[in-house]
Image (tube, rainbow, N blue to C red):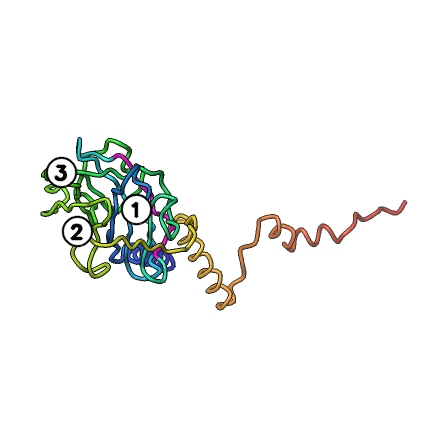
Amino acid sequence: MQRHFIVFAIAHMVLFAAGHAHAAVVINEIDPGQAGLDPYEFVELHGPANTLLDGLVLVFLNGADDKSYQAFDLDGWQTGPTGHFLLGTAAVSPTPDIIFTPITLHNGADAVALYSGNAADFPNGTPATAANLLDAIVYGSGHADDTVLMSTLGETVQYDDTDTTSISRVPDGTGDFTNNTSPTPMHSGIPQVVPEPASVFAILQIIAIATSTRKRRGVAPPVSRDAQRSASPTNQSSSSSSPTSRSK
């Protein structure tokens, strides 16, 4: 009975954590190109306020070969009180939650995709895929449509960016992408917390529950063999008695 309870509790906690981490997070705004050396590149995500981003990875895909060239593991991060999370260069204001160097985000025709997974799943040169895909945008700056990226990622539109505008969802988080919007980056402002493995968390919870249940039932904890031997009647008798001396 106790084993069944433990298995059920672990499954429940793992499913709860996974659902909470992946709650409706989308790519909300991108600005890949500006005048000069693209000093203000950014990608903004949006979701419910304070949503954990564990188990998510943001991937940049190169339209030249339709393969990945950058991946950002989002474990330990979360959206802020406004539901935003920001990746970008150090010159972007407010300061991005994750900072990358200028000219990291290509100008097109390229794509940005949000996946369920880890950065290790997308080493540079990984072909674009629809597996575990949560959201994506294909974009350029006057480039011909990249039909391979569009088809693979399930997109029907390749959006155009300019040096003075961004591409963003209107309204935030729920609307379709729109060209020629004013850049409005927003960050979470919440530092990264390196997460404990889900299995460790589950085990600690089960130990706590089992200990609490044992105490309520008045069950004594297991006794070691050495303690049992020292407490046995035979040992007590032999240790308390002394050898009988013979009178001469």
Q: Is the residue marked by circle 2 packed among few (<14), some (14-19), or many (20+) residues within 10 Å?
A: some
How far apart, in angstroms, are the residues tagged by discs 1 and 3?
Answer: 20 Å
Q: Nearer the viewer, residue 142 or 67?
A: 142
Describe residue 213's horizontal placement relative to residue 10 as left or right. Answer: right
Report which quarter residue 16 is drawn in.
bottom left
Report which quarter residue 209 is drawn in.
bottom left
How far apart, in angstroms, are the residues tagged by discs 2 and 1?
Answer: 15 Å
Q: Nearer the viewer, residue 136 or 193?
A: 136
Label at residue 143: 3
Ranked by sequence position, the earlier of labels 2 and 1 is 1
Report which quarter residue 233 is drawn in.
bottom right
- Three-letter code, disc 3: His
Dot 2: element:
strand
Q: What residue is rendered at 57% in x and 50% in y?
A: 224
Dot 3: element:
loop
Q: Quadrant of the C terminus?
A: top right
How far apart, in angstroms, are the residues tagged by discs 3 and 2?
Answer: 14 Å
Label at residue 42: 1
Image position, residue 9 (x, y; %): 35, 59
Image position, residue 89 (x, y; %): 35, 43
Provide the residue designation for mark 2.
179
Image position, residue 91 (x, y; %): 38, 45
Number of numbered discs present?
3
Dot 1: element:
strand
